[in-house]
Image: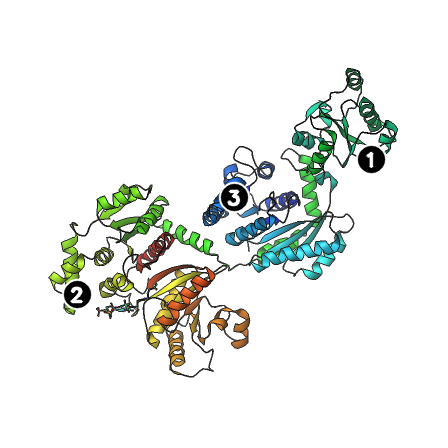
């Protein structure tokens, strides 16, 4: 079941309004907790987006206009050009999620395709739909397209979405030629999979052609006469340059006449034709070239009973005609007639029952990197934890602290000298309030003696003397870890300037493992384009035994679960199933058996090769009865050589974001950064550490 849908198209003026109005009317009959959301609007803050205005007013939505969008088109392009796509997507996800939580259904509208760069826009819409984790409704503009062209367009568009893992609930072939609706639907159904509902909607003149009022507004024209007939629809326009008899032969139904202001004969002729039973309706007249009609002509017009709108513009005749041809009809909030036509069209042509069935049947397990990160930060904020960062001397740590404090994700203590940190914060032009964090210098801290004493007590059986314990406590890794041990911080993140050994050894020595776990290991959350995979162990245990491998697998599955990923464990090896022989394969086979024995609730497969683990087709071929093959989410490597190099290879070759390593199995969370870490890595590691701290407090 989905409670949101993404309305999108491939070009401007495809008729999204009909579907938006129809769908909103359908949903409004079922719930009043309904929202409409358009992440990127065409206008700015001053000039309201017409569709948002229309939908908000017509359906009397309680959400504010500001809640309905995130960026103006101009701002969105600026963010993309500045390389801030992640910020753009995160901001959209955040606002959407808020609406989703407070609504029964959210209709999301894609961008308007107002630029020449439609390919970029097409991909952008797919990416937003994917990151919101919602299915799409595609509306295609079929006007002036042959049936084979419509079929090609539909197939290509659908493929674009499906290839990126976005499901399409409905494909609407809009503005098809009247009378061809059934034939086109039939042809489309031959090539479009059944999961996607196919709908055709015929061209409707009333909705697709502009009114005189819209033309007046678009040309910024002066209205000379006929205010009460501005709703007249214009089906085509003619230039009045010839003699009156010839001119009259060209008048059709709902014609707009464009003529220079000094052609009083044509103006009067058009007005007479409009009231004559022998001629069709004249929609209106535009007098061009800035020439006002003669006073005698004006007098004659003033005496008439029915006067169609007469507009005056400065532009020349041919320019006016060109501009008029580009004016598109829109449905405004006050246009009750057009709104009801649109809703009626939807009701007539869209199989509402079939659409509802597809909304209910929709299921998505896609988790994009941005969705994953959004969920992590949201979770961390729910129950703020206190994290210690021992490496206050490193700029990346301070820059990440700035982001964490400004976003109110965690409370922080940074180890270091206060004055040095203050100077660095100024030098880096960071804006966070230093009073909001704790700064602790181990060298002068009043906690120092007590911490050294505790370390001595904990490690004296290992030969540590009080003098040695004091020596060790000067090391920020020991000091930070002791804060966590004592409960004066909930977790520690370090390793930007220290090695893995240096960072985690204190935790191994006295934070120790959780009850029931004897091995500390680690996982990376590998954010691949459409899913997040858990890789373990890639950072801690060089040559695990079968028992340790089983520990790694169980801890990794629990870590996956903790962060919302359903664990399906693949115990990796160079052989799949029972075929392989050899010590290394046997180690993995035994570890798999141990996992099954110790945790029968977990889905596990092993030994299995990487391709059979993650590729559905290979998985089905090699291990047809497996619940894991082809869909593994937790990948356990047989040793550190394989694990460490595989995570680095995937990260480098695919550009995947690797969050971690996150240590698992410790009594309290301590995490290690790599020395090549970025500010984003520090930020993400602090976020997962605080989630671990929430879990270990439970
Ligand atoms: N689980 C639980 N306890 C452990 C573990 C473990 N995996 N490893 C060591 N310990 C305990 C020991 O039992 C010992 O406890 P004790 O002193 O109370 O008896 C204590 O920790 C210290 O043990 P040592 O054997 O001295 O461990 P050492 O400190 O040398 O090393 C370490 C442990 C750091 C995990 C080591 O195995 C190592 O260097 N691993 C590889 C790290 C690495 O270089 N990773 C790759 C880079 S990271 C990256 O690329 C992201």
**Image-based side of 518 in relation to 7, left or right:** left
- Of residues 586 and 268, the one nearer the viewer is 268
Q: Earlier in the sequence, mark 2 or mark 3?
A: 3
**Mark 2 Cα-neighbour bin, 10 Å: few <14, some 14–19, many ≥20:** some
Q: Nearer the viewer, mark 2 or mark 3?
A: 3
Q: Earlier in the sequence, mark 2 or mark 1?
A: 1
Label 1's element? Answer: loop
Disc 2 and disc 1 in contact, CB within 8 angstroms: no
- Of residues 27 and 461, the one nearer the viewer is 461
For label 3, the residue is 77
Q: Nearer the viewer, mark 2 or mark 1?
A: 1
For label 2, the residue is 459
Query: Which residue is painted at 64% across and 35% down in the image?
Result: 332
Distance from disc 2 to disc 3, alpha carbons, whole Å, reads: 58 Å
Q: Position of residue 82 (x, y in %)?
A: 46, 45
Distance from disc 3 to disc 1, alpha carbons, whole Å, reads: 44 Å
Disc 2 and disc 3 in contact, CB within 8 angstroms: no
**Mark 3 Cα-neighbour bin, 10 Å: few <14, some 14–19, many ≥20:** some
Q: Does ligand 1 reach within 8 Å of label 2's beta carbon?
A: yes
Label 2's element? Answer: helix
């Amino acid at each position: 079941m989905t409670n949101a849908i993404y309305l999108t198209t491939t070009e401007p003026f495809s008729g999204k309004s009909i579907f938006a109005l129809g769908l909103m009317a359908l949903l409004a009959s079922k719930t009043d907790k309904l929202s409409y959301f358009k992440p990127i609007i065409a206008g700015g803050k001053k000039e309201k987006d017409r569709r948002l205005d229309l939908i908000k007013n017509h359906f009397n939505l309680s959400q504010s206009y500001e809640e309905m969008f995130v960026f103006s088109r101009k701002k969105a392009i600026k963010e993309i050009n500045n390389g801030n796509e992640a910020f753009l997507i995160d901001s959209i996800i955040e606002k959407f999620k808020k609406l989703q939580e407070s609504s029964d259904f959210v209709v999301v509208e894609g961008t308007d395709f107002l630029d020449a760069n439609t390919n970029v826009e097409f991909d952008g819409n797919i990416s937003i739909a994917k990151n919101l984790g919602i299915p799409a409704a595609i509306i295609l503009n079929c006007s002036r397209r042959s049936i084979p062209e419509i079929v090609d367009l539909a197939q290509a568009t659908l493929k674009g979405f499906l290839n990126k893992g976005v499901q399409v609930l409905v494909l609407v072939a809009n503005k098809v030629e009247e009378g061809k609706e059934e034939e086109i639907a039939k042809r489309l159904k031959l090539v479009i999979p059944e999961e996607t509902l196919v709908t055709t909607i015929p061209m409707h003149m009333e909705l697709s052609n502009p009114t005189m009022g819209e033309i007046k507004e678009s040309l910024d024209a002066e209205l000379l006469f006929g205010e009460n007939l501005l709703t007249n629809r214009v089906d085509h326009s003619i230039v009045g340059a010839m003699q009156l008899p010839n001119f009259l032969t060209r008048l059709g139904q709902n014609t707009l006449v464009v003529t220079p202001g000094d052609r009083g004969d044509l103006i009067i002729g058009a007005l007479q034709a409009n009231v004559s039973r022998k001629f069709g309706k004249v929609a209106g007249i535009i007098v061009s070239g800035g020439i006002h009609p003669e006073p005698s002509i004006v007098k004659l017009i003033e005496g008439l009973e029915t006067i169609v709108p007469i507009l005056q513009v400065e532009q020349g005749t041919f320019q006016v005609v060109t501009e008029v041809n580009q004016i598109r009809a829109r449905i405004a909030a006050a246009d009750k007639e057009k709104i009801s036509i649109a809703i009626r069209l939807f009701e007539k042509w869209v199989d509402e029952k079939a659409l509802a069935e597809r909304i209910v049947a929709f299921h998505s397990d896609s988790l994009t990197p941005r969705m994953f990160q959004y969920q992590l930060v949201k979770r961390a904020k729910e129950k703020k934890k206190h994290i210690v960062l021992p490496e206050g001397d490193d700029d990346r740590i301070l820059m990440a602290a700035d982001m964490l404090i400004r976003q109110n994700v965690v409370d922080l203590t940074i180890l270091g000298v206060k004055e040095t940190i203050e100077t660095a914060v100024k030098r880096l032009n960071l804006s966070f309030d230093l009073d909001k964090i704790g700064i602790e210098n181990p060298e002068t801290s009043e906690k120092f003696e007590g911490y050294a004493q505790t370390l001595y007590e904990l490690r004296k059986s290992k030969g540590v003397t009080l003098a040695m314990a004091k020596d060790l406590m000067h090391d920020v890794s020991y000091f930070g870890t002791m804060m966590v041990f004592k409960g004066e911080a909930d977790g520690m993140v370090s390793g930007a300037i220290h090695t893995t050994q240096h960072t985690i050894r204190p935790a191994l020595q006295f934070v120790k493992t959780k009850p029931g776990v004897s091995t500390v290991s680690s996982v990376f959350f590998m954010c691949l384009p459409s899913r997040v995979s858990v890789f373990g162990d890639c950072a801690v245990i060089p040559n695990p035994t079968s028992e340790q491998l089983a520990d790694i697998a169980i801890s990794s599955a629990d870590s996956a679960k903790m962060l919302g990923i359903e664990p399906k464990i693949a115990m990796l090896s160079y052989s799949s199933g029972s075929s392989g022989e050899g010590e290394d394969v046997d180690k993995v086979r035994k570890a798999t058996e141990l996992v099954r024995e110790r945790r029968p609730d977990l889905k596990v497969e092993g030994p299995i090769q990487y391709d059979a683990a993650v590729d559905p087709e290979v998985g089905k071929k090699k291990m047809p009865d497996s619940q894991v093959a082809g869909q593994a989410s937790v990948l356990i490597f047989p040793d550190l050589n394989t694990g460490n190099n595989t995570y680095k290879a995937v990260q480098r070759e695919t550009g995947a974001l690797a969050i971690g390593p996150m240590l698992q199995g410790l009594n309290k969370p301590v995490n290690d950064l790599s020395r090549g870490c970025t500010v984003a890595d520090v930020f993400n590691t602090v976020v997962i550490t605080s989630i671990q701290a929430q879990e270990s407090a439970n």
